[in-house]
Amino acid sequence: MNKELKDSIPTDSEVILGILNNSESVLKRMYVAYFPMILQLIINNNGTADDAKDIYQEAVIILYNKIKAGDFELSSKLKTFIYSICRRLWLKRLSHMSRFGGDIRDFQEHMHVEDEVEKQNDMDIQFSKMESALQLLGEPCKTIMEDFYIHNLSMQDICERFGYTNADNAKTQKYKCLQRLKKLFFQQK
Amino acid sequence: MFAKVEEVVFSAEIREAKMNEYKLQEEIERYLNGEMSPEELKQFELLRKENTAIDTKVNEHQDFTKLLKQYSDRLALENRLNAIHDEIDVHTLADELMVHPSWVVQLWRNHHSKISVAASVAIFAILSVMFLTGKMTNQDSQYIQLRREVGNLKNKTDKINQKLSQNGRANRSANAERFSGTGFAITSNGLIATNYHVINGADSVYVQNAAGKSFKAKVLYTEPQNDIAILKIVDTSFRNLGAIPYTIKKAESDLAESVYTYGYPQDAPHFDEGRVTSAVGLNGDSLDYQISIAINPGNSGSPLMDSRGNVVGIIQGKQTQLEGVHFAVKSSYLLSAIHNIPADSLTRKINLNTKNTLAGLTRVQQVKKLNNYVFIVKVYQ
């Protein structure tokens, strides 16, 4: 399996194009190709395999969003970028857990990626707010919100799904739910 | 009744406001979703430009729904990644990628508590064994000291053997010098003070001055209990020594006072200096001072001088078991011995020198002057 993996490491431009085109296979090949590097970094620096998974996925998401947003310039190797992001994230987490002894055992060259990590951190805060707001919203509001705003279902579909007698009722319900969700979201600090 | 009407009007207003808000929301959504007709779009954009409150609402709604969308995208991506992740054999990979430290480090990491306990026990055991076998009672240094002493003793016996063999030969050739010590003049007419043990058992006694000239002397008076002897030069070739430069001190010297001696442990005169280290001698004997001057055989009877050139004692001996413990008879005993000399053994009354001419001189000059008044006492048996 390992040999097969090595053979199938996608080139950097392949990855960028693949993500832009929502290619599942390229994403998978990329993920599988670089995970061992990060696993090595984390488990040899006081981390577990689960820590490695968390950190690596966060880094992949940063990369993914950056490519999707169209502002990813390949100034370094993709490998170096991923490694640097993970290294930065792991250092942050280590110092947060006060398990950081002051030195980290490195396996790759790395670069400064503080900005990316900070940006991601801000987004993560917003997302966790949204997550708990949706949780607090409860059913059926949550599903209505998801169906309308995320899955882009029409009011007619929603009306049928939830058995509302007419679209106006469903609209009123949706309006109320949105107001509540906004309230819940902005209430959080 | 009037109030009630107002209330109704008020609640109607609220409902209207709510309705408006709802309508506005509806419009905003339609606007953002591009569901408006060109006419409506034009109007709405005009409204948005004029009314900043509505403009803010539009932006806010847009941001919020965007965040909602992003959030769901994130969730979807995470699910995709998790699905990919589940296909990886993380455990095997982790085993392969773990940097394996050397077996010593691994042993330590896995068993450090046990190793620590074992080490403590071992250290304790070694210490107890050392303690029980007396390894820790400083035997080593004692042993070295003892060895030194043995060395000293050996040296001494060697010397004695040598002397004896020399003496054996010398005895046969008769009149060989048996013992030697030092003495110093107490009067200009030839009274010499020395130790009793120097002349004890002597057949004949000679004194030799620094120039190498010997004079026959006789034992005039002894005080064996104080180890003091007074000799008188009876040789006809003896000339008056001239005024004695030093005086004999009556008072006791203080501890730590700087003292020196001048005597004949060998054929040439020998100078050494030190301090008064105790006002009492061996076993608390008040006869002696302890002094920190190295003394060798032959030094016995040498004058112990203080820095002002007073005789404060007579060098007597040393403690063999202890390092650096040397004794000198206090000068007050010498004075009393001189006083005790029976008048009939004297041709005339002793006049001790009362004028110290060494006081202002340097040590070197003092020693130069002493030269004429210190003698080798040679004893024949």
Image (cartoon, coloured by chain):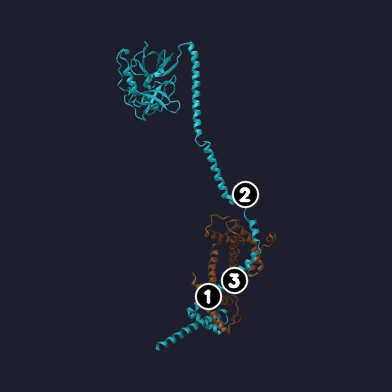
Chain colours: A brown, B cyan
For residue A18, the mark is none
Tell me the tag on residue B73: 3
- Residue at image location 43% in from the left, 86% down from the top: B7
* Quarter where residue B32 is shown: bottom right
Tell me residue A86's x, y (percent). Answer: 58, 61
Please provide percent x and percent y for residue B94: 63, 58
Residue tagged 2: B103
- In three-dimensional space, the C-alpha distance between marks 1 and 3, rounded to whole angstroms, equals 18 Å
Q: Nearer the viewer, residue B250 or A107?
A: B250
Whether residues under marks 1 and 3 lie with C-beta atoms below 8 angstroms apart, the answer is: no
Find out whether the residues at labels 3 and 2 contact each other: C-beta distance under 8 Å.
Answer: no
* Residue B75 placement, left or right of B191: right
Q: Which residue does the numbered mark 1 point to in the structure image?
A: A181
Q: Nearer the viewer, mark 3 or mark 2?
A: 2
- Asked which secondary structure carries label 1, the reply is helix
Q: Amino acid at mark 2?
A: Trp
Is residue B53 found left or right of A32 in the rendered image? left
* Chain letter of the residue beneath label 2 in the structure image: B
Q: Are marks 1 and 2 on the same chain?
A: no
Marks 1 and 2 in Cβ contact (< 8 Å) = no
Residue B359's quadrant in the figure? Answer: top left
